[in-house]
Image (spheres, rainbow, N blue to C red):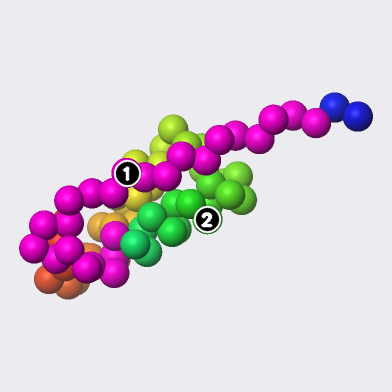
Amino acid sequence: MNISKPDIIKSVTIKNQGEYGTCYAHACARNFVRTLQMFGIIKSDYNEQFYLLFLNFLTENTICKA
């Protein structure tokens, strides 16, 4: 039986959240990315891009900006 080594999941680095240091959107975006990585939907190479995409979705109509 040949079992391949799983990809290493790399978290998105914690960003400076500026004025809105407790913004829910940063935590949610990081969790979305990590969940998709665990299911093998995205590779660790794209975690920053997906993080920014989810963050943009979550903060589109709010005062909470990155």
Mark 1: few/some/many CA within 10 Å (<14, 14-19, 20+) = few
**Badge 2 amino acid:** Thr
* Residue drawn 38% across the image and 55% down it: 30
Q: Where does the image place residue 60, in percent across and percent down from the top left?
A: 21, 65
Magenta span main SS: loop
Q: Is residue 14 visible?
A: yes
* Residue drawn 36% across the image and 58% down it: 29
* Residue drawn 44% across the image and 52% down it: 33
Instruction: Point out the image quarter for the C terminus.
Output: bottom left
Instruction: Mark 2 vs mark 1: give the one in front.
Output: 1
10 drawn magenta: yes
Instruction: Point out the image quarter for the N terminus.
Output: top right
**Badge 1 amino acid:** Thr
What range is drawn magenta here?
3-26
Disc 1 is placed on an element classified as loop
Drawn side of residue 4 relative to residue 66, left or right: right
Q: Is residue 49 visible?
A: no
Drawn side of residue 1 relative to residue 51, left or right: right
- Of residues 26 and 14, the one drawn nearer to the viewer in this rendering: 14
Precedes in sequence: disc 2 or disc 1: 1
Q: Where does the image place residue 23, in percent across and percent down from the top left?
A: 23, 67
Up-down relation of residue 60 to residue 36 (above or below): below
Up-down relation of residue 28 to residue 40 (above or below): below
Q: Where does the image place residue 6, in percent across and percent down from the top left?
A: 66, 35
* Residue drawn 26% across the image and 57% down it: 56
Mark 1 lies on residue: 13
Mark 2: few/some/many CA within 10 Å (<14, 14-19, 20+) = some
Mark 2 lies on residue: 35
